[in-house]
Amino acid sequence: MIILTFEILYAPIPEPLIMSDIIHLLPDSVASQIAAGEVIQRPASVVKELVENSIDAGSTAIRVIARDGGKTLIQIVDNGCGMSETDARMSFERHATSKIREAVDLFAIRTLGFRGEALASVASVAQVILRTRKPENDLGTEIIIAGSKVESQNPVSCASGTSFAVRNLFFNVPARRKFLKTNNAELKHIIYEFQRIALANPEVEFILEHNDSEIYSLPRTNLKQRIIHIFGKGINQNLTNIDTVTSIVRISGFVGKPELARRTPGEQFFFVNNRFMKHPYFHKAVLSAYEKILPPETIPSYFIYLEADPDTIDINIHPTKTEIKFENELAIFQILLAATREALGKFNLMPSIDFNRESSVEFPVYRRDDPVPVPQISYNRNYNPFDEEHRIPEKSGHDGGQNLKHWEKLYSPEGIPLEGSGESAKLTGHSSMPNGNGKPTDSFIQLKTRYILTPVKSGLMMIDQRRAHERILYEKYIRSFAMNYPVAQRSLFPETIELDQADYLILREIMEDLHTIGFDIRDFGGNTLVIAGYPAEISKETPRDLLEAFLDHYKSTGGDIKTGVRERIARSLAVAGAVNYGETLSQEVMQEMVDHLFACESPAYSPSGKPVVVIMGIEEIEKKFK
């Protein structure tokens, strides 16, 4: 008999749990920093909140000044209504606002900033200098605040309007500051916020400066000219007007032509009551309108403005106020879908039936004076279906019995070579099967212009042609970085391209690295670049296509902090330059691709980690025939 003895040990109650009162109120400074974490995420958030306040103040000219990507300085200067001495001090209190009196006002909002959290949040994590004056006053007010603490408040002589100078963002929260990205990356986010506000308010003059260099100078104009000023003259031919009015919503703006769609987001904008918003459901409606006319894996440009009764929308569901809930989302989805299709059809951008083709049907025209022909029929009067000699015609469209000869070869072992017969068919070596002349035989099959099939000793090997080319190019560019030896080809006629400001800044940031791998790009000024050379062994037709595809992929991987800049460049350029699906490859090209693939360090996976090679074993193949 076995006797088990259990001893139960009682752990002592932790000291905090036996205290009677453990809940306490946070200090105002800590509470403000927590609120700032929701509203102020990066320098671009400061630009958004302060510029929106300037617009609400009735400004017709707004100037945005930034230094070091907004980390050192963000200054917003406007010519709005200004503030009195009391209002200037009250504006930094939490939940202080001039736009909300009672809860019902939340459902009748037509202004941008209304919560009263922005200035208090900014002042809690930065050093702020405010100068403001109303037009009717002789003197203005200057307030200096650092970390929610008011250091001084004095009368000052200044221009009418308001000027906010925000210095050293997150100076008292080093854990937040160290996670800010590079200056150019933060500037890119500032540009995105600036573009959204400028597109929503074309009647306002905007200026954006960074490190004493002017990036944008946007005069007061109409919407189409504002879009052209921001994204360049090349977009002018891409815009198609959209305008629909219903009892639920009014939809206006512009949509882009299908053939100029891009691979990644960048020129997709929704606005409701002049407020930028993100709405995946409405985005799906726009894409549905482009169904079957959009190039694969691309997204069209659109600048769509919705006007709806504020009582039917809720803009208070997210701290940044970019996610908005609509009362009639399903109805608006259908209206937006129909309006977009109408805009595309109006300008002949939708596919139509072509009645002028030679293969079109001809309808006979009957006239009263024309004689009515007697129907004619021809047949062989001597045909006897029971006659043996007529059972299989001697001559027919399918060559009669000729096709019945040698049918057994379809089922012979030589018919479909599923198994290799030598060392050359192994995965570890070359896949070619040379003949007596030393030339490769047709040992590769291209399936659906997407996969390369070839027999190996263990079965059938399948290779994804695009992923294989991505792996080959990726390792080639990584070697070029390591050896600092570019492999380039010169353009016979250098190509000039104009970029929007965000793409232009990205290329300037990585220009030296691009030169290392074979690009010869020269800055022509004014967001214009000249491409005189580009990496060899690419599949794109023009340097412009290659550069645009590279930028699209590079921007889409911008949040990947684990990947170094040069590795991101190599990966993006490999994706941009790889052979596309749908391209027919010759035996020589497939042979060369397979040889280069298995010379790579990691041939089994693409740079993004997706499988490149799959082998279907003989046993698996045999199971399919049981």
Image (tube, rainbow, N blue to C red):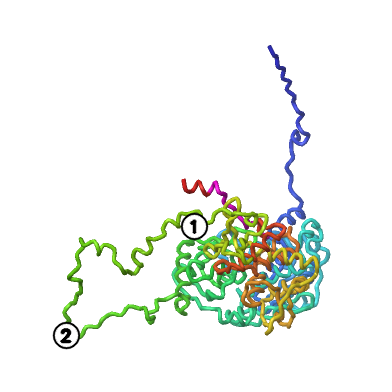
Q: Looking at the image, tell me whether mark 1 or mark 2 is earlier in sequence order.
A: 2
Q: Residue at x 71, y 77 (%)?
A: 489
On the image, which quarter does residue 81 sit in? bottom right
Find out whether residue 575 is within the magenta segment.
no
In the foreground, 3 or 37 = 3
Q: Which residues are magenta?
A: 607-620
Q: Is residue 556 left or right of residue 354?
A: right
Q: Residue at x 70, y 59 (%)?
A: 94
Residue 41 in the image, given as x and y percentages of width and height: 71, 61
For disc 1, the neighbor class at 10 Å (few under 14, some 14 to 19, many from 20) is few
Q: Secondary structure at mark 2?
A: loop
- Quadrant holding the N terminus: top right
Q: Is residue 427 visible?
A: yes
Kind of residue sitting beneath label 1: Gly
Give the labeled residue for mark 1: 415
Extreme bottom residue here? 369
Q: Residue at x 54, y 60 (%)?
A: 325
Which numbered tag is attached to residue 99? none
In the foreground, 283 or 315 = 283
Give the labeled residue for mark 2: 371
Q: Are marks 1 and 2 in contact (CB under 8 Å)?
A: no
Q: Is residue 530 above or below residue 10?
A: below
Residue 575 in the image, given as x and y percentages of width and height: 65, 66
Q: Is residue 156 left or right of residue 37?
A: right
Question: Depth-wise, is mark 1 or mark 2 nearer the camera?
Answer: 1
Residue 97 in the image, given as x and y percentages of width and height: 66, 64
In the foreground, 128 or 201 = 201
In three-dimensional space, the C-alpha distance between marks 1 and 2, rounded to whole angstroms, equals 61 Å
On the image, which quarter does residue 369 sit in? bottom left
Q: Is residue 611 left or right of residue 40?
A: left
Kind of residue sitting beneath label 2: Pro
